[in-house]
Amino acid sequence: QVQLVESGGGLVQPGGSLRLSCATSGFSASAYGMSWYRQAPGKQRESVASISSSDGTTDYVDSVKGRFTISRDNAKNSVYLQMDSLKPEDTAVYYCNALRYSLGSRVEYWGQGTQVTVSS
């Protein structure tokens, strides 16, 4: 049974920090590129951060550069998102995503999401 379970969300004040975790099981996450997406009500889901399966290359959307850090621990099949200097506009449901291409096939998995609310 494939599972991606996010945790670590919650309510935080502007300028505060949270660390999101994505615990995976049922597949070899080390072979997948991993990403964090977020979606606010009435908005499109956007890719926030990604990390490759091979060399650990990372990418971030401009709005979070310098504030968020994605990392992975392949031994634990887990992915993390350290979020610092949080802003109200970071408020959204954050989703963990796994993606792999192999011989023309595309395999993608999603977690259920965790709510992040940044408010005074």
Image: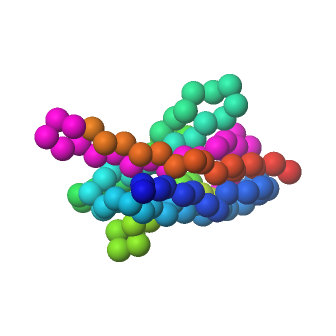
- Report whether residue 66 is seen: no
Rendered location of residue 44, percent (x, y): 57, 27
Residue at the image position 64 percent from the left and 62 percent from the top: 8
> In the shown orientation, is residue 88 left or right of residue 78?
right
> In the shown orientation, is residue 94 left or right of residue 107?
right
Instruction: Name the quadrant containing residue 74.
Output: bottom left
Give the magenta-colored segment's residue range. 85-105
Rendered location of residue 79, percent (x, y): 45, 61
Which color mode does the image show? rainbow
Q: Which residue in the rendered view is the most extreme toward the right?
A: 120
> In the shown orientation, is residue 12 left or right of residue 112?
right
**Quick check: is 91 in the magenta stretch?**
yes
Residue at the image position 51 percent from the left and 60 percent from the top: 22
- Report whether residue 108 is seen: yes
Nearer the observer, 43 or 108 = 108
Compared with 75, 37 (above or below) is: above
